[in-house]
Image (cartoon, rainbow, N blue to C red):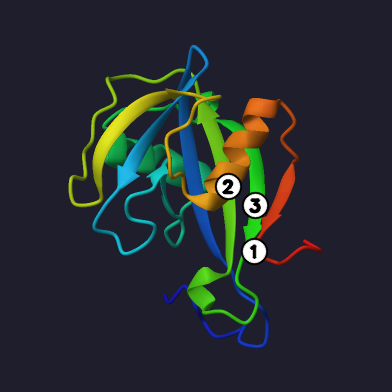
């Protein structure tokens, strides 16, 4: 069965993605992107697209395992925010809904698992992040630092977001 049966051709579509920040003692784990063609050289969370037939929670668990080699229980994922992100009039691939999670409990030691997609990994104080951070993630990380994360954020829609 095809996941796109064409029934929504007349509707706006978005790409769902998940982001997971591992946190400990006021720090956040970030990896530096490389070789992906998107924001290479920027620091970022473990993240990726939700696959067809997969829930956002299952995708978050999978991405952490694939990228960092650790296991996070679905019950240990804490929702942080959801972001509607896009480029109005831009390509379909850049019309997104991003689900952000954090976890303070996991099994294993985080290590880079995908050397073709990231070349460094580090723990950083939430108030002293490395530069540069992927811009839409920086919005979330700053809100986490400030302790006031809106349930829903928008990014890329101009000043009247």
Element at label 3: strand
Residue annotated with mark 2: 99
Query: Is 117 placed left or right of 20 in the picture?
Result: left
Q: Residues within 10 Å of mark 2 (few under 14, many from 20)?
A: many
Question: Do callouts 1 and 3 mark residues in contact (Cβ within 8 Å)?
Answer: no
* Of the image marks 2 and 3, the number of the one nearer the N terminus: 3
The answer to whether 14 is drawn above or below residue 129 in the figure is below
* Of the image marks 1 and 3, the number of the one nearer the N terminus: 3
Quarter holding the N terminus is bottom left
Residue 78 on image: x %, y %: 59, 29
Question: Residue drawn 53% across and 51% down?
Answer: 135
Question: Residue drawn 53% across and 77% down?
Answer: 92
Residue annotated with mark 1: 156
* In front: label 1 or label 3: 1
Element at label 1: loop
Residue found farthest to the top: 25
Query: Is 71 placed left or right of 128 in the picture?
Result: left
Query: Is 69 placed left or right of 25 in the picture?
Result: left
Residue annotated with mark 3: 83
Residue 115 vs residue 78, the one in the foreground:
115
Question: Residue drawn 50% across and 48% down?
Answer: 18
Q: Residues within 10 Å of mark 1 (few under 14, many from 20)?
A: some
Mark-to-mark CA distance, 2 and 3: 7 Å
């Amino acid at each position: 069965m095809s996941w796109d049966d064409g029934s929504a051709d007349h509707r706006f579509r978005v790409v769902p993605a998940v982001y997971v920040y591992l946190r400990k003692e006021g720090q956040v784990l970030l990896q530096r992107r490389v070789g992906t063609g998107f924001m290479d050289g920027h620091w970022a969370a473990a993240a990726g697209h939700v696959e067809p037939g997969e829930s956002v929670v299952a995708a978050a668990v999978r991405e952490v395992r694939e990228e960092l080699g650790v296991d996070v229980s679905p019950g240990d994922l804490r929702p942080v925010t959801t972001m509607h992100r896009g480029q109005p009039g831009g390509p379909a691939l850049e019309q997104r809904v991003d689900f952000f999670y954090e976890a303070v409990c996991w099994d294993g030691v985080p290590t880079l698992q995908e050397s073709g997609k990231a070349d460094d990994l580090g723990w950083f104080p939430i108030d002293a992040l490395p530069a540069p951070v992927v811009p839409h993630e920086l919005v979330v990380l700053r809100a986490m630092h400030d302790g006031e994360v809106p349930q829903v954020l928008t990014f890329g829609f101009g000043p009247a977001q």
